[in-house]
Image: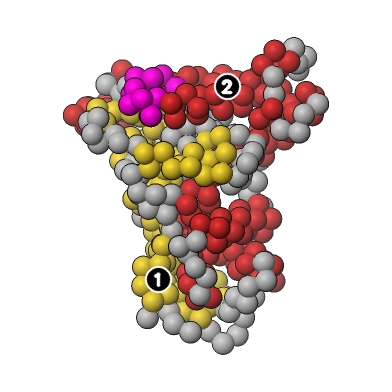
């Protein structure tokens, strides 16, 4: 079998947060930043793994259930073997320019790069979207069941299915993935990502708390998923926390639709409004923002952004701002200065130009 190099992108979610596991809508895009894996099969079923981003290599059997970063790779192998694929053992070396733990989904980039390399080894047809959908599903199971991070599926879906120049409208009620052209360049706008450098940790429980509260709210409303919640009935919920959690999910789904409509109309002010309202909802109703994220969002707006919101699972990570191209430097320096005044870590920045899904780079 040949050696394969494959890569997969990080992502930023334009709008639609904590909706994926609630049968809802979100609108992520693939970043130009990618994780690359160089994979050579070996004759036994074991794995030998190294990463330029991690000090520790790992070697062993998938059944050994490694902790730490190797679990993301071993989990993908396990999930694909469960799907009936005859995945050989391999040596893999990994490198990435996706910021790790910044809410930009370095985890799905790693999983999807590995899944894509393995798919190429096995001769699967990566031009077939249903093959890509199944690989994404295997990566979701790897992260949920093997790593133990209760993420909802947005990250792996966009990493496998994104198209350059487009955001991807994901509907977790019917499983559809619809590309939405995002001609920001023509409008003189960019999506600026502000990495607060406060690493979130999805396995620390806060994310899982929100997942549980969402399920509790749906149960209290007597429905299977918050996607089908009724606004009037939500406001009648006796429990204040569950009421606000449900309110966020319902209103966030509506904001995703508003954002898609605004993009279609090239109404960038309306898109910006949806971003702003999304942030308010995450800060007040879903309570997943942080002082750093709030400061990044407020400062970006006052320095020229049309709109801004925190993005990703929350509790740290990144914010995004819709910024006229000419104002990007002013926004960046304003945020950097405000962070310094507040005694926060120095933020990092990247421009989110919508890029391509996971792909094979070379086979030798
Ligand atoms: P995010 O996906 O937002 O970056 P996660 O906590 O979901 O944050 O995933 C980060 C984890 O994924 C890291 O702690 C590490 O275990 C693993 N990981 C991501 N990228 C790499 C990489 N390039 N090399 C090794 N492990 C990685
Ligand atoms: Mg992740």
In the image: residue 118, left or right of residue 273 = right
Check residue 268 for magenta coloring. Answer: yes
In the image: residue 230, left or right of residue 267 = right
- Please tell me in which quadrant of the rendered image residue 320 appears: top left
Tell me residue 342's x, y (percent).
38, 25
Q: Which quadrant is the C terminus positioned in?
A: bottom left
Upstream in sequence: badge 1 or badge 2? 1
Tell me residue 104's x, y (percent).
45, 45
Q: Name the residue under label 2.
A: 251
In the image: residue 138, left or right of residue 166 = right
Q: Residue at x 61, y 34 (%)?
A: 24
Q: Depth-wise, is mark 1 or mark 2 nearer the camera?
A: 2
Q: Most prominent secondary structure in the magenta stretch?
A: helix
Q: Which mark is residue 5?
A: 1
- Please tell me in which quadrant of the rendered image residue 267 appears: top left
Q: Which mark is residue 287?
A: none
Q: What element carries label 2?
A: helix
């Amino acid at each position: 079998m040949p050696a394969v190099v494959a890569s997969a992108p990080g992502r930023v979610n334009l709008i639609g947060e904590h909706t994926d596991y609630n049968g809802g809508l979100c609108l992520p895009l693939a970043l130009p930043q990618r994780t690359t894996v160089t994979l050579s099969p070996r004759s036994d079923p074991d794995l030998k793994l190294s990463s330029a981003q991690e000090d520790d290599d790992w070697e062993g059997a998938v059944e050994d259930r490694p902790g730490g970063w190797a679990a993301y790779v071993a989990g993908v192998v396990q999930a694909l073997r469960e799907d009936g694929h005859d995945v050989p053992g391999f040596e893999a070396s990994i490198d990435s320019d996706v910021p790790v733990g910044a809410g930009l989904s370095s985890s799905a980039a790693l999983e999807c790069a590995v899944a894509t390399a393995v798919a190429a080894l096995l001769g699967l047809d990566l031009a077939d979207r249903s093959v890509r959908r199944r690989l994404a599903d295997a990566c979701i199971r790897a992260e949920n069941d093997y790593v133990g991070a209760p993420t909802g599926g947005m990250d792996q879906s966009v990493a496998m299915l994104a198209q350059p120049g487009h955001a991807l409208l994901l509907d977790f009620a019917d499983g559809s993935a619809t590309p939405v052209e995002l001609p920001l360049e023509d409008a003189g706008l960019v999506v600026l990502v502000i990495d607060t450098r406060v690493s979130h940790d999805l396995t620390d429980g806060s994310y899982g708390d929100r997942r549980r509260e969402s399920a509790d709210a749906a149960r209290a409303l007597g429905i299977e998923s918050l996607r089908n919640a009724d606004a009037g009935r939500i406001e009648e919920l006796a429990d204040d926390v569950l009421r606000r959690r449900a309110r966020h999910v319902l209103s966030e789904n509506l904001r995703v639709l508003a954002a898609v409509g605004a993009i279609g109309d090239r109404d960038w002010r309306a898109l910006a409004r949806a971003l702003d309202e999304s942030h308010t909802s995450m800060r007040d109703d879903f309570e997943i923002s942080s002082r750093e994220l709030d400061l990044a969002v407020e400062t970006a707006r006052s320095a020229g952004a049309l709109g801004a919101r925190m993005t990703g699972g929350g509790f740290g990570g990144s914010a995004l701002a819709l910024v006229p191209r000419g104002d990007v430097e002013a926004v960046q320096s304003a945020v950097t200065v405000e962070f310094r005044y507040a005694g926060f870590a120095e933020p990092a920045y990247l421009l989110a130009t919508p890029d391509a899904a996971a792909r094979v780079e070379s086979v030798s």
